[in-house]
Amino acid sequence: MLLSMAGILVNAQVVISIDTSLHFQTIEGWGHGGGVLGGAAGPYFMLDSAVANPVNYQMLDYLVDDLGLTGSRTWEVGPRVDGSGMDNGDCDSIDWSKFEAGSLPVQMAGYLVYFKNRILAKGCQPNFYSSPGYPTHATDQKPWVMYHPGERAQQIWASALYLKNTYGIIINHDVIYNEPSGPVTSTVLADDIKALGPRLIEKGLITSSQYSESISPQSAWNLITQVQNDSLFWTYVGRLSYHNYGTADPYRSYIYSFGLTKGITTAQTEMDSPTFDDLYSDLTIANVSYWEVGYSSGNTLAQDTGLTSFTPSNTFFRLRQLMHYVKPGASRIGTSTNDALLHVLSFLHQGKVTTIIENTSGSTKTIHLTGLPPGNYGRSQAVSGATSFQESGISTVGAGGTIDFSVNGNNAVTTLYPYTSPNQPPTIMTWKSIPGYSVMPVSSATLTATACDPELNPLTYLWTVTSHPAGANPVPGSPNTATTLVSGMTAAGIYVFNLAVNDGTNTTSRKVYRVVYASNPPPVLGQTGFRIAAPYGLVFGDPSDTTHANIEPPVSSVILQAGISNIANDNFSGQGLWSLVQQPAGANITLSATTYIYVSLRATVTGMTVPGDYIFRINVSNPGHADLTALVICTVHPESSAPVIASITPSPANLTLPESTTLLTAVTYDPENDLLRHWWAVVSAPGGAYPSFDHPCKPVTAVSGLTVPGTYVFQLRAFDDLHKTTQNVMINVSTLTGTDAISNIDGGVAIYPNPFSHETTLKTKDHFKNASLTVYNIYGQREKQIKNISGQTITLQRDNLPAGLYLIQLTEDNAVTTGKILIVD
């Protein structure tokens, strides 16, 4: 009977086995899909810097140290809010006086630098990617950006270069368009990425593109399949990305599998209100290496009223059970279980294993875990919807690699993590003042905190006063408890309290800030400007400036918008009014009533049909303070005409191999003498040929790489602010017997075939003498080298090099010549 019962218990036991030999993706990091600066913006705009800065620093500390974030989306810096460009017609020659660095205020940039340095201090490399913001949206629908790859490329590389040189912020990846749709096709995205890639390399930037940043895995997969055979395109893509809205499966697995064939990792880069279950699915179905919380200023740490403290969201601590313990460089490894109601993940990092278990059943289960490296392990748990997590103490795993423990049900997430001695300090999970601010004569508040300790040591609390306004005498009523009432805050100003939590060995401290106002705190105007129909987009600027938009017929209406908010998150319906200050003689616009929507005051203007300046004012009543006001201007210009391409002359128009270069000379003008921009594009070329332009942004350019016989068709695009004019030109290339395709590098050296799939030959009229040939990838890393070459030809084998673009360097008697080769599958 005893034997029978033992057999039943063994059979009922939940077993989890870890296989450290089976590896999946390597984690690159965890990030903010909504931009780390989003969470810092409220305090920055509405609080004195004496309290805004330390509050924001604590928020960033918490996101890095406790949640485990190592990266973020950042907004592009530099594109002009007035919808004009940053150059004088040549996309490869930026005019830095037209670069609007002010779209990233210095103090906000300081938060980004602080975030970066905090990540570095944790021993991790920051991972940032850039995405279009409001300034970019003032131009991204205009033809000279949408259909001019060089101009869109300039916005991206200029932003990355500025952030690197000014703040030491390295942009690892870029996004061409966020959630592309409509006119933003795979062709537009591919053209932009192929224009951007070489320019990033030229500027010494390590940035590569995220593709396709679509709204769902399904739409991302559609855009991937449309360019899957473009070998050159994939050399500049560093990450496959998707947002997780809409249809996810089976497309997530398709994206990951395709990335494997290209050596490209996968990332989920936005999902609003994601849960642990979403994280688990992305890690196991899409095998993502990078994962983000969308709009994380609310989905991780929600700011409390008063903006001096924050509360972890109801999904924060279950996400923390994985993100806090699994660092970049960790590899997801194999797990198996005999219970389908358990979601199990294990990660190996520097020889240590971390295991995360979600119990989706409704009951507690006892786990028998096998395959662990011997050592000490801590265990923590967060239940669904929790506002805290609980530690369960330290256990030792012996040489057998097994451990038994219980996990709660109802989607609780339990983590078994490697424990490092000596005694670890306590974790303060929440700390705040309730309420976060007050208006005199209110003079008291409650200070409260929650904390836990890895070793389950008893905790002691101590509240002290760090600073306060003159004339006040704040006193914590119960300074040695987790929650205490403070009285004596009788003067307006900033009060700072210190919380110290001690476990008998270590002390963890946090600051609590509280602001007492003499009268109701005033609202603050945010960005002011216009929402305008395509191709204009969003034109917004700081309210202290006068935002200026420019339009022309047939557009004759705009939406006026001013951001408005205060620390109490009040509703401002009826407190703001847009009014007309000036319009041109003979004009008779219609201005709608002002409405409050999405923390902004809006009104619609119609009937702007007469050219000239239209000036509008926003006025917000502000009892007890001066009214808030800002001006915006919209200038209506006479309707313009499209640019003219008078002629295109190729010289020569017919080539015979090995001649592979011709000069294209265009004559263009604009009827109104508007600034013109130009872009040369390849319409068609014989298979295996990869033509390139030396100056694609200029009306006169040489085109090389005409190495395959046949007909080539090139297109010149000429742009003013609103129009695009195109004209094609055709070049014929004749066959040269005995070669497949020939291109030349300096020094009279021919390369053929080029592109190639297996091997190519370098040939010179003279003889190589003790020469060496080195092959570099697009990041400047050496891939191959052949030394001590003599003779008239060099045969270069592909070997295991992946398809893509490479640079070659031929050295002979201290003379160095360079060229490019393209390997295709």
Image (spheres, grey):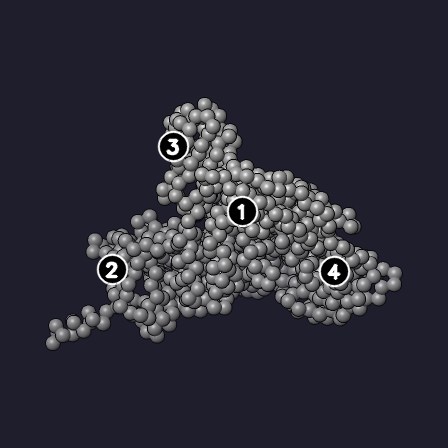
Q: Secondary structure at mark 2?
A: strand
Q: Which residue is mark 4?
A: 628
Q: Residue at x 73, y 50 (%)?
A: 644
Q: Which mark is residue 710?
A: 1
Q: Is residue 431 above or below residue 659?
A: below
Q: What's the amino acid at mark 3?
A: Ile
Q: Earlier in the sequence, mark 1 or mark 4?
A: 4
For marks 4 and 3, give the one nearer the viewer: 3
Residue depth check, mark 1 versus mark 4: number of the one nearer the observer: 1
* Image spot of residue 174 (x, y percent): 53, 51
Residue that label 3 marks: 786
Q: Residues within 10 Å of mark 3 (few under 14, many from 20)?
A: some
* Mark with earlier residue (1, 2): 2
Residue at point 70%, 46% (across, down): 647
Q: Nearer the viewer, mark 3 or mark 1?
A: 1
* Label whose residue precedes the other's in the sequence (2 or 4): 2
| Residue 737, visible in the rendered structure | yes
Residue under the image location 63 percent in, 62 percent down: 567
Q: How many marks?
A: 4
Q: CA distance from mark 3 to mark 1?
A: 34 Å
C-alpha span from label 1 to label 4 = 67 Å
How far, Cα to Cα, is label 2 from label 4? Answer: 65 Å
153 w.r.t. 19: above or below:
above
Quadrant where the N terminus is found in the figure: bottom left
